[in-house]
Amino acid sequence: MSGVFLGGLFGAGLWLAIDRIIVARRTPFAMRVLPYLRDLPQTPRLTPVSVEPTSAFVGVFGPLLRAGADLVERILGGAGSVRRRIDRADLNLSVHDFRVEQVVWGLVAFVTTAAPSTLIALRSPARAVPLLIFCVIAFALGVLLRENKLTAQVTRRERRILEEFPTVAELLALAVAAGESPVAALDRVVQRCHGELSSDLRRVLAEVRTGTPVARAFDDLAARSGLPVVSRFAEGLAISVERGTPLADVLHAQAGDVREAGRRALIESGARREVFMMVPANIG
C-alpha cells in the first residue's frame, strides 16, 4: 500500500513537471507581437504586461486549479447568484476567481483529512475505501464552506450599511435642503463619510463623472443592492433627478423608517436574550 501511494505521488509530480516544461517552452503571444508594436506612436505609454504566472505555485498548479474551478461551476452552477453576492459583498473577484478559491478551500480540507487517513489506512487497509470517501466528503464541505462564508460576508456588509444609512440620508437631506443639487450633495457627503454605503455612493459618483446618466447610475445601485431600503433610496434619488421632485422630505422619512426598524430589531433581540439571562452563570 505504501509503495502504491509513493509511486502515485512520484508519477503525479513527474507529470506536473513535464507539463510545465512544455508550457514554459511556448513563447507567449504578447512576446511574439511586441516587436511589431515598438515603432507605433503610442508605444511609450505601453507597459509590458506579464501574462505568465509570477509564482511558482501558481505556475505549477494554476492550470489544475482552473480546471477544478470549471468542474465546480458545472456541478454547482448558479453563476448569476454568485455574481450578485460578490457585488453585494463588494469583493474584487470574478466568478471564476471565486470558484478557484472554493477549490483551494476544498483541497485544504482534503489534505487535512487525508494526512491522518493515510496513516490509518496503512495500519488497516480494509478501512481505505471508507477513509477515501471521508476525504471526498471533506473536499465537498470545504467547497461549500467557502460559499457559506461569501453569504456571511454579504450579511455583515449589509448590516453595516443599515447602520450607516440614517446618517448618510440625513446628511444628503441637509445638503439638498441647503440648495445643492442631488449630485453635488452626493459629492459632499461622499467626501466626508467613510463606510460601506459611502463606498457604494462613491462608485455611483464615479459612474456619473465618466458619462453615465445620473438616473441610470442610481438605477444600477438599486439593482445591485440586496436591501429594500437602499433600493428605495436609490430609486427616490433617480426619480428626483429625472423629474425634479422634492427630495429632502423623502430622505428624512427614509432615515426615520430605518431608525425605527433598527429600534424594533434591538427590542426583539433583547426579548430573545431575556430567556438566556435567566440561566444561572455557574450551573452546579
Image (cartoon, helix red, strand yellow):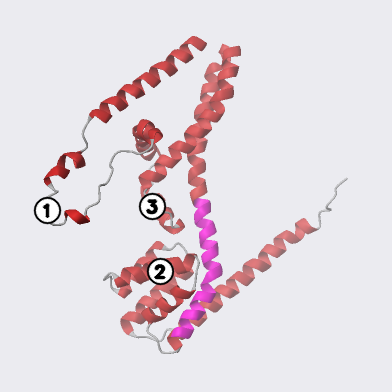
Query: Looking at the image, is mark 2 or mark 1 earlier in the sequence?
Result: 1
x and y percentages locating residue 1 in the rendered image: 51, 10
Q: Amino acid at mark 3?
A: Arg
Q: Dot 1: within a 10 Å radius of its alpha carbon, few (fewer than 14), some, or many (20 or more) residues?
A: few
Query: Which tag is nearer the camera, tag 2 or tag 1?
Result: 1
Provide the residue span drawn in magenta: 151-175
The residue identified by callout 2 is 202
For the point 39% across and 20% down, which residue is it? 12
> Could you give the CA–CA distance between mark 1 and mark 3, rounded to whole angstroms?
39 Å
Out of 129 and 114, give the one closest to the viewer: 114
Image mark for residue 83: 3
Residue 183 on the magenta span: no
For the point 44% across and 37% down, which residue is it? 103
The residue identified by callout 1 is 40
For the point 47% across and 83% down, which residue is it? 173
x and y percentages locating residue 102 in the rendered image: 45, 40
Label 3, secondary structure: give it. Answer: helix
> Could you give the CA–CA distance between mark 2 and mark 1, rounded to whole angstroms?
37 Å
For the point 56% across and 68% down, which residue is it? 163
Image quarter hosting the C terminus: top right
Query: Looking at the image, is mark 1 or mark 3 earlier in the sequence?
Result: 1
| Main SS, magenta residues | helix
Q: Is residue 193 above or below residue 179?
A: above
Q: Amino acid at mark 2?
A: Arg
